[in-house]
Image (tube, grey):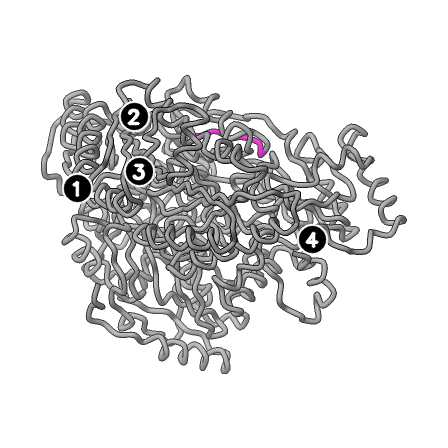
Amino acid sequence: MAEHQGGDRAQELIAGVARAYEQREALYINGGGSKRNLAGRSCPAPSLEVGAHCGILDYQSAELVLTARAGTTLREIAEVLDAENQVLGFDPPLLDDRATLGGTLATNLSGPARPWRGSVRDAVLGVQLINGKAELLNFGGKVMKNVAGYDVSRLQAGALGTLGVLTQVSLRVMPRTEHELSLAYEMAADEAISTMNQRAGEAKPLSGACWLDGRLYLRLSGAASAVEHTARQWGGEQYTQCEVWDALREMSLPFFQGDAPLWRLSLKPTAEPDIEQGSMLIDWGGAQRWLRANIDLERAHASAQRGGGHALLFRGGDREGQLRAMPNAIERRLLQRLKRAFDPHGILNPGRLHADL
Amino acid sequence: MTSESPALPPVQRAELLRRLRQWLSAHCIIEDEESRRTFECDGLALYRELPLIAVLPENVQQVQAVLRICHQLQVPVVARGAGTGLCAGAMPHPDGVLLGLSKLDRILEIDPLARTARVQPGVSNLAISQAVADHGLYYGPDPSSQIACSIGGNVAENSGGVHCLKYGLTVHNILSIELLTVAGEQLTLGSQGLDSPGYDLMALLTGSEGLLGIVVEVTVRLLPCPEMATVVMAGFDSVTAAGDAVSAVIAAGIIPAGLEMMDRLAIRAAEDFVGAGYPRDAQALLLCEVDGTREEVGEHARRVADLFRERGASSIRVSRDDAERALLWKGRKSAFPAVGRLAPDYYCMDGTIPRSQVSRVLVEISRLSEEFGLAVANVFHAGDGNLHPLILFDASDPVQVGKAEAFGARILELSVQVGGCITGEHGVGLEKLRQMPSQFTEAELLQFEDIKAAFDPALNLNPGKGVPILKRCQEYRALPDRHNRG
């Protein structure tokens, strides 16, 4: 298909990184600016602007593959996919239409459908990036299966731009499901967690399971006959339109408003909640818990460890401090070596992930 | 295809054995030549090498000890699961230790409610699904070697299978791994949650072919068994028509659980072998499996059959029960051994291509088949674009071996030219090292090399496989020789 409007700024970006490499100056990689205060530590360096490096380069709906420049907004991608009745399976937040493809991969942000349709990390097939030596490199590709070389593409998910400036991403996309329904039940958190897990163990077209304000919500998506049949079996209040999912994905629910620290706990889906303070929202069938609470990292980390996972101060609080527990010494040494392998002078988003990366 | 390299000095070999014996009992250390020969190759028997010593540790502590000892003595270590790999990735190093993980074969924990299983690396892929079947669960990736292949090897190769278009590869179906570094230090990668913050080392390790660390435990995600599945089989008069039919299914918004294509030679070989009822006169055969709830399977199977009919299918058959479904699959699953009966040996290629390129690629492969004078049968994971041409040859004839390898190399390069890659699921190993530069630039290969060095600076883990080492820098000037023996 024809290239969409947008520009190829790869040479400018390479020149920007080359300058920083020579002068050993830090860069803060900025796409749409929607995540500056999310997911990572603050990084007070001059911005390298990737937002103008945008445009969809290739989209073959029959191949289920889309390639776009990293600065392309998810809104634009969603619109192009929509015309072919396809979607981004990982259901990402569009964040007032500012979220870009590169930023979404760098933060590994996926929406409520993630447990069933995979994350952005799962959907990525290939990337082009500029490493810290200003080399433009391609990894992975545009095909579903590719095991040649190390999986550098998925390594970018959650790396917060510390291993390279993403310039292009190829993704697997999915057909839009034919029919959708939501079910709601009045329920306490622990009962909701156990119900979510039981339902997820049934071979039904479940595509969302969250709990907030004393209500469990289940979303069904698939063939109309399967969705309707399951809804009859499972009971509950039925909604053909349920605004909870969009508001949850966009973090626009009242739960997310205000300045209280927002913790993200990524846990075993069956983990029992053990922090009484503040308020909690459960997503991803129990595997992602959001907390609004003034607790310290030690407390959040201890709780996450008991739940088999990790805690991250996702938004608010002290963004110059530690946002998650430090990995142990062995892992830290590996992370630092890996960082140097991509960015020997430590110029790309220094400190964004960890103070020493 | 063995290489010449000076053997480890006898003194060092003796010291290695002395230290290994402190940790491993005699039956776990394999020294005599006849027993070592068991490990000389993986599923790609064209490449063989005897290891200096093979060890079969019985617990994680012993694996750790082996790694520490080899690290202290700077001895290469090659990990091996079940040895079913198809790229000589587990071929031993003549100066190194072959680290067999087959005795770590316990399923440690099953959590039916959280839908996970924690297993040791030597557990076979199928054993996981069998162990959790009573809970109505199964493990998604299903490589055709699943009866034998180990989950540790699946992680090392990022194995797929016929169901991966819908259910993903190994990397999509594991939650956490316990990893030993080259120095024997233990690390937990991933967690019991879905996404962990920070670098996704688990994704990096998946498919890294034993070059970055040794996997000693895996926590896999389990899926609920679908209520039912149905196969729609269709014969076509041309590969192009079959390719169009595949695209039509995807465009209709159906993601099949499996979607396989076979060409005429493969159809006939499979039919002669198992009598599945395949149309012997068809130029191409499609097998499309849809699964899910009863309602959606009925609906999707009807739509798939209609689409195949509209695209000119010469014959269509829809499985009426599980026995018929199993029979239709049996032909496909036996395709490799069936084709194997047509010649003394076959050489299986593994490029992945965009689906739209399949007829162009098959026409070119057929032309190359004439050029090299070797027959080829094609089996294609049409849903995900992974093409397995099986080149027929006689391994006892050096001329034919050379031709088969040259033919294979041309197919891989062709896959890259049409926008694909040299390996979809079998890995690079030793076999495809020479084709890596057709897919990657020198700067990209150097980036791989730097990743390798971050984990294993002395290049002791599976040297000579996966990524060619180009660098001639001070710190390992002497090492590329050890590494690049392919």
Mark 1 residue type: Val
- Please rate how many residues cluster around mark 2, counting C-alpha atoms within 10 Å: few if below 14, some from 14 to 19, many from 20: many
Frontmost of labels 2 and 3 is 2
Q: Are marks 1 and 2 in contact (CB under 8 Å)?
A: no
Residue displayed at 55% across by 33% down? B149
SS label for mark 1: helix
Residue that carries the numbered disc 3 in the rendered image: A116
SS label for mark 4: loop
Picture disc at residue A244:
1
Mark 4 residue type: Asn
Residue that carries the numbered disc 4 in the rendered image: B460
Question: What is the quadrant of residue A277 in the picture?
Answer: top left
- Please rate how many residues cluster around mark 4, counting C-alpha atoms within 10 Å: few if below 14, some from 14 to 19, many from 20: many
Mark 2 residue type: Ala
Q: Are marks 4 and 3 on the same chain?
A: no
Q: Which residues are magenta?
A: B116-121
Q: Position of residue B110 (x, y in %)?
A: 47, 25
Q: Are marks 2 and 4 on the same chain?
A: yes
**Can residue A295 be seen here?**
yes
Frontmost of labels 1 and 3 is 3
Give the main secondary structure of the magenta stretch.
Answer: strand
Q: Position of residue A351 (x, y in %)?
A: 46, 64
Residue that carries the numbered disc 2 in the rendered image: B229
Mark 3 residue type: Trp
Q: Earlier in the sequence, mark 2 or mark 4?
A: 2
Query: Please, is residue B417 above or below residue B114 in the view?
Result: below
Residue displayed at 62% across by 63% down? B469
A196 vs A14, left or right, is left
Q: Earlier in the sequence, mark 1 or mark 3?
A: 3
Q: Are marks 1 and 2 on the same chain?
A: no
